[in-house]
Image (spheres, rainbow, N blue to C red):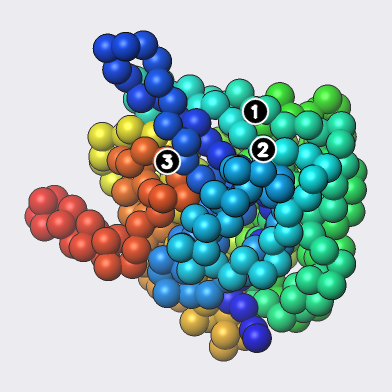
Amino acid sequence: MKYDVISAGEPVIDFVPVDTQDGLVYRAYPGGGAVNVLAEVCAMGGNALLLGVVGQDHFGEFLLEEVKKRGIDVSGIYQTVKRNTGIGFVRLSQEGERSFLSYRDYDTEVRLYRHEDLKAAEQCRIFHFTSVSLVSEIQREDTFLAAFLAAKTGLLSFDVNYREAMWKDTKMARELFLDCIEKADIVKLSEEERLFLCGDKDNSAAAKALSGQKDKLILISMGSGGSYYYNKGREGICPSFRVEAKDTTGCGDAFTGALLANLMPWVKKEAALSEIPEKELQKILTLANGAGAICASRYGSLSAMPYRTEVEDFIRRNRKRDD
């Protein structure tokens, strides 16, 4: 089977705070950057496979069921007794911005996928990965091998998704990220990550440097400022949508999943990214921004990924309001 998007990563449990009069209470939500992106791909009408691992525990069983409910093929996920399922406690600001406190045994190495599932990587149109699967040396090897095989027949998508607390060596992290960006066709990063990688360069200068004059689509998320894009000299900003943010944990993943799903008609035609008309690219980014905005207005991440009809209705309502 030819998949639209395959990703590699560990599904995790995000504990999101819920305010009550009895004190701080946390609610468990399924999440993980790779699985969130694939959930949005499926919500937009695509098909997807996750190569990943969860613990052989209660949370692992829960995640398998929740991932399956979102339409993702879970045949590439295996369970291990070597390490518990990763969990993280999310801290939300009044504006919905999040920070993480992760509990995961990084010293216990586990493979990111079973060797027999690797051949699926050669059957995808886009392979998506994030820096989270590069922290562990073994999982880094697994990610790079899957990306190498996928690049033979499809495109590579990389989300920098830098979390400083996960990295003991920030210099190594920066070098790894730049290497991944050099190999990738589609790159997403935040303005904070742009500063980490490119110093005081502005969005335009940074995107030009990162693209290396290749046919790459560079995307820089600017929060309420919208999304900056750059592709072979074409650049611009796609405005964001105003919402009351409750939890921004998965909004970047919703953006990326919607982006990849809506690039798919062009990918299936084997069109170069630079061959996509700029108006069409802006339409795709508008859908991606809409998906991210809806996600930010909800709690959780995997369960907050909006379906295509929701996103299209949301954009129509906002356009009518602006008119």
User: Which residue is located at x 59 percent, y 70 percent?
Assistant: 73
Mark positioned earlier in the residue sequence (1 or 3): 1
Q: Residues within 10 Å of mark 2 (few under 14, many from 20)?
A: many
Q: Dot 1 corresponds to which residue?
A: 102
Percent x, y for residue 70?
46, 63
Above or below, 58 against 106 in this view is below
Q: Dot 3 corresponds to which residue?
A: 300
Percent x, y for residue 202?
58, 37
Q: Residues within 10 Å of mark 1 (few under 14, many from 20)?
A: some
Q: Dot 2 corresponds to which residue?
A: 86
Who is closer to the viewer here, 299 or 126? 299
Report if the CB atoms under discs 1 and 3 are less than 8 Å apart. no
Mark positioned earlier in the residue sequence (2 or 1): 2
Q: Amino acid at mark 2?
A: Gly
Above or below, 160 against 320 in this view is above
In the picture provided, is 137 more to the left or to the right than 166? right
User: Which residue is located at x 21 percent, y 63 percent?
Assistant: 313
User: Which residue is located at x 81 percent, y 33 percent?
Assistant: 106
Distance Cα–Cα, label 1 vs label 3: 16 Å
Who is closer to the viewer here, 306 or 151? 306
